[in-house]
Each structure stands twice: as structure tokens, then as C-alpha cells.
Image: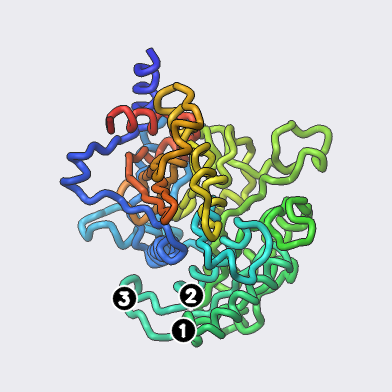
């Protein structure tokens, strides 16, 4: 009975499981496991969207087959894939179709899983997730500044200016220090790094040289906003772990996005968290869900929020967030915790992690697979451990079908070495939205049963 229920759930979500024979015949999606690889994929999705090279959005067709607007999925701008249509396509093109999208969003969740030992030893303070977002945003900014070869027909060697806005002044100061370190260590092109301008949302304005003046052309730059949130827990403040409320975050974000539009600059928002305002500061008339007084979240047409992954998502969706829906790129480092993923991540970053400390995660994995309890003596004497710690997933608008690709993260640990590998296990269709934890469990259980 459990197997039949699982099968119905997989069919509902349109999950395509990958068998070993199929993976040998076709190239399986690869999971980006470093800051450089994630930034490269995010850049390709952003540049492809601005240049009209997105793969056609499958939600356009699925929406046409629905009889109720309540079942509609958000779609990308028609311009985003305008260059992918054949010359014989006679679809009517409106003036709006020819307008490049002014705003877009990308979702990076669990960036701390990208950290390595050398990142931990850097001068960036704060939470692991906060440090990881600073490192990722600077990696992405370097790619956005550099020439877009392969995306623009008349790509020039000129560098674009990129204004990067962080949620708080503390984060902006940490990012400035990291940028200075990159310049000093010569780990990147100095000319590229000099075109990155760091600020924070509270400043409320673009750099003067990026503003469009009357009767002048735009600067061809970009605006990058990193994880705007009204309930911040990532800042490098002394009382780490104690969140700070920023009631003016939405107003500041709206001001920056308006100025970017007025100056004809594309604005990319990374991981907006406008849902984090605690219930204690909400009006009494609002519901008890963890959301802001204006309900900044997705509507009830899906089971898991696109940004942040809240289950179930709560609505209504603000117009500001709707401008960023759907994201052009999604990277989720931990979509399902199988065996204490966060503890595993912390132990991997130790200079020499204790093999005995890994036994608990290993036993958790054994309980999941067999349903039996394993005594400590059966694993404490082992010299090597191999277990699955979490599931991860990605989605990009540059892939046909915009599928959600799901990966199992396998930990291979010994006293001498510890490394992770990522195995592609299947994908789900875009029209169902971001997979929730329930379908993640079914996908992993089905894949484990077929792998034995």
C-alpha cells in the first residue's frame, strides 16, 4: 500500500527516475558543488534571460490547458526566449514581447554547503550562510562584469559596472573586505574587480555614475541585490543568532529596483527573504504563519514556496515578489536532510574530523534504509563510512523543460579523507512547482529501492 501511494505521488509530480542504464546512454545533469560552478550556471541563466536565449517556458503550455486561473503557474517574460523560436514561427509579437525583463530573481538556499576549510579561515565573520552568500555574490558579480561572449551577437571587450547591494551595513563592510582581499591576492582580474561597487540597501541610491541622465544612454551596467530580508540572521553582529528586524527593507528594495528600472539597468535579486518577519511584530488581525503583515509569499497554487521553501506557502503574493517569479536559476544545497546534514557539514570543515563523530550520521542512514537500530559497537570500530546525508536540487531556465533536477549527496569518510559525491537520481516537471519535502522522501525511497 505504501508503495502504491508513493507511485501515485511520483506520477502526480511528474517525476522521471533515472536508471543506471539510462545514465550510461545519456549525459546526466551535473551538480555544481563549488562557488565557481554555481556562479557560472547562475550567470548563464541571467545572461541568457537578458539576451533572449532562455529555453521556452513549459508553463505557458500547461497554463493554456488549465480551465481555472487558480491553477496557473507564473511564467517568464516572452522576451526571455524570443531568440529560441524558429524563423517559421508566426506567433504575434507585441511591443511588450520585445522589452527585455527589467527584474529577475535567482534562489540560492544552503550556500553554506559550498564552504571549504580555506573559506572558514578567511576574515569574513558572521553565520556560515552569511559568509557563503558574500563569497557567491562576488563570484557572480565578476562574471556579470566580464564580457558576455557567446550570449551577445556583438559582444565587446568593455566591462560592465555592477552595483552589489547587501541587506545590512555589516554585510556590506564584510563584502568590501573580501573584495579588497581578492584584489590584494590577485585571485581575479583587477580591472574586473574594480568595476564592482558594494553598498547596502539603506543607502537608497545607485552609484552616481550608473544613473541614467536625461538625453543620455544607459551605462549598460547591472544591479545585484543580495538576500534582502526584513528579519536578518546572517549579519556579522556580536550577538550572532539573535535576528534583527529591518522594517524598512521592503521600502529600500523598492527604491533600488525603481532606480534601476529608471536607468534601464537589469536588476537581479538573489534569494529574497521577505517572509521572515516574526509573528510577534505582526498586527493582531493577521494569521499565525511566519510571514510579514503584508503576506509576502507565493499563493496557494503550490505546496512549497519558491523562495525559502516554506511549507505550505502562504499568500497573497506581493507585486514586488511577483516581479521575481519564477526565478531564472535555483540551487538548493539541502532540499531534504537525511542524516544530520548540517552536523555533517560542520564536521567536514574541521581540520581533522573525528571518525567516531561520523558514526551517528552513519547510524541514522542505516535506520532509514533498514528500519533497524544499529548499536554503536557495530560501527565505532569501522575505518570507513559511506552514507547519504542530504538531497540537493537545481533548476535553470537554460535547460529544456525547466525541470527540477534532484541529486543525492553521498559522504565518503575515513580517518585520512572526507569527500562528497553527487548522484543524479531524477527530475520533476516545472508545472508542479518546487518539490516539497514529502515528494523528496518518496523520490529518495524509490531510488534506494531500485539501487539495491
Identify the residue position indicated by label 3 in the image: 153
Residue at position x 63%, y 35% in the image = 314
Q: Residue 351: x and y, percent?
A: 54, 60
**Observer-nearest of 194 and 334:** 334
Residue at position x 69%, y 64% in the image = 255
Residue at position x 49%, y 58% in the image = 114
Q: Callout 2 environment at 10 Å: few (<14), some (14 to 19), or many (20+)?
A: many
User: Decide: marks 1, 2 in contact (CB < 8 A)?
Assistant: yes
**Which quadrant of the figure has residue 279?**
top right
For residue 51, above or below residue 208:
above
Residue 414 makes an appearance in the image: yes
For residue 421, above or below residue 316:
below
Identify the residue position indicated by label 1 in the image: 189
Which secondary structure, mark 1?
loop
Q: Which circle's residue, 1 or 2, is located before the other in the chain?
A: 2
Q: Which circle's residue, 2 or 3, is located before the other in the chain?
A: 2
Q: Callout 3 environment at 10 Å: few (<14), some (14 to 19), or many (20+)?
A: few
Residue at position x 40%, y 28% in the image = 369
Identify the residue position indicated by label 2 in the image: 142
Q: Callout 1 environment at 10 Å: few (<14), some (14 to 19), or many (20+)?
A: few
Using the numbered discs, state the Cα–Cα distance from disc 2 to disc 3 in whole angstroms: 21 Å
Q: Residue 234: x and y, percent?
A: 68, 57
Using the numbered discs, state the Cα–Cα distance from disc 1 to disc 3 in whole angstroms: 24 Å
Amino acid at each position: 500500500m505504501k508503495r502504491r501511494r508513493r507511485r501515485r505521488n511520483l506520477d502526480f509530480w511528474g517525476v522521471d527516475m533515472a536508471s543506471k542504464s539510462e545514465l550510461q546512454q545519456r549525459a546526466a545533469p551535473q551538480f555544481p558543488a563549488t562557488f565557481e560552478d554555481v556562479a557560472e550556471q547562475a550567470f548563464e541563466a541571467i545572461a541568457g534571460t537578458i539576451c533572449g536565449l532562455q529555453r521556452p517556458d513549459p508553463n505557458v503550455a500547461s497554463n493554456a490547458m488549465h480551465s481555472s486561473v487558480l491553477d496557473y503557474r507564473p511564467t517568464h517574460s516572452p522576451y526571455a526566449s524570443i531568440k529560441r523560436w524558429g524563423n517559421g514561427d508566426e506567433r504575434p509579437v507585441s511591443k511588450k514581447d520585445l522589452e527585455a525583463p527589467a527584474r529577475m530573481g535567482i534562489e540560492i538556499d544552503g550556500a553554506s554547503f559550498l564552504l571549504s576549510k580555506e573559506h572558514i579561515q578567511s576574515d569574513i565573520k558572521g553565520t556560515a550562510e552569511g559568509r557563503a552568500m558574500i563569497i557567491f555574490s562576488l563570484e557572480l558579480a565578476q562574471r556579470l562584469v566580464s564580457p558576455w561572449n557567446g550570449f551577445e551577437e556583438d559582444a565587446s571587450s568593455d566591462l560592465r559596472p555592477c552595483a552589489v547591494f547587501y541587506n545590512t551595513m555589516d554585510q556590506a563592510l564584510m563584502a568590501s573586505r573580501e573584495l579588497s582581499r581578492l584584489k590584494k591576492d590577485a585571485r581575479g582580474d583587477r580591472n574586473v574587480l574594480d568595476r564592482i561597487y558594494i553598498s547596502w540597501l539603506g543607502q537608497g541610491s545607485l552609484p552616481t555614475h550608473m544613473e541614467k541622465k536625461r538625453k543620455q544612454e544607459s551605462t549598460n551596467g547591472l544591479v545585484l541585490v543580495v538576500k534582502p530580508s526584513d528579519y536578518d540572521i546572517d549579519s556579522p553582529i556580536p550577538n550572532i543568532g539573535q535576528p534583527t528586524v529591518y522594517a524598512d527593507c521592503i521600502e529600500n528594495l523598492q527604491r533600488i529596483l525603481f532606480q534601476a528600472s529608471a536607468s534601464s539597468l537589469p536588476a537581479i535579486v538573489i534569494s529574497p527573504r521577505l517572509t521572515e518577519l516574526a509573528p510577534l511584530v505582526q498586527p493582531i488581525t493577521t494569521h499565525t504563519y511566519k510571514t510579514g503583515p503584508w503576506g509576502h509569499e507565493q499563493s496557494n497554487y503550490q505546496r512549497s514556496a519558491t523562495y525559502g521553501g516554506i511549507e505550505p506557502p502562504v499568500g497573497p503574493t506581493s507585486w514586488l515578489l511577483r516581479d521575481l517569479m519564477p526565478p531564472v536559476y535555483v540551487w538548493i544545497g539541502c532540499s531534504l536532510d537525511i542524516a544530520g546534514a548540517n552536523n555533517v557539514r560542520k564536521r567536514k570543515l574541521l581540520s581533522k574530523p573525528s571518525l567516531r563523530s561520523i558514526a551517528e550520521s552513519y547510524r541514522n542512514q542505516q535506520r532509514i534504509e533498514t528500519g533497524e537500530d544499529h548499536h554503536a559497537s557495530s560501527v565505532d570500530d569501522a575505518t570507513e563510512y559511506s552514507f547519504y546525508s542530504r538531497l540537493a536540487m537545481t533548476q535553470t531556465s537554460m535547460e529544456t523543460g525547466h525541470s527540477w533536477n534532484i541529486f543525492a549527496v553521498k559522504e565518503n569518510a575515513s580517518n585520512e579523507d572526507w569527500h562528497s559525491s553527487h548522484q543524479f537520481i531524477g527530475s520533476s516537471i516545472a508545472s508542479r512547482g518546487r518539490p516539497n519535502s514529502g515528494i523528496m522522501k518518496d523520490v529518495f525511497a524509490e531510488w534506494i529501492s531500485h539501487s539495491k
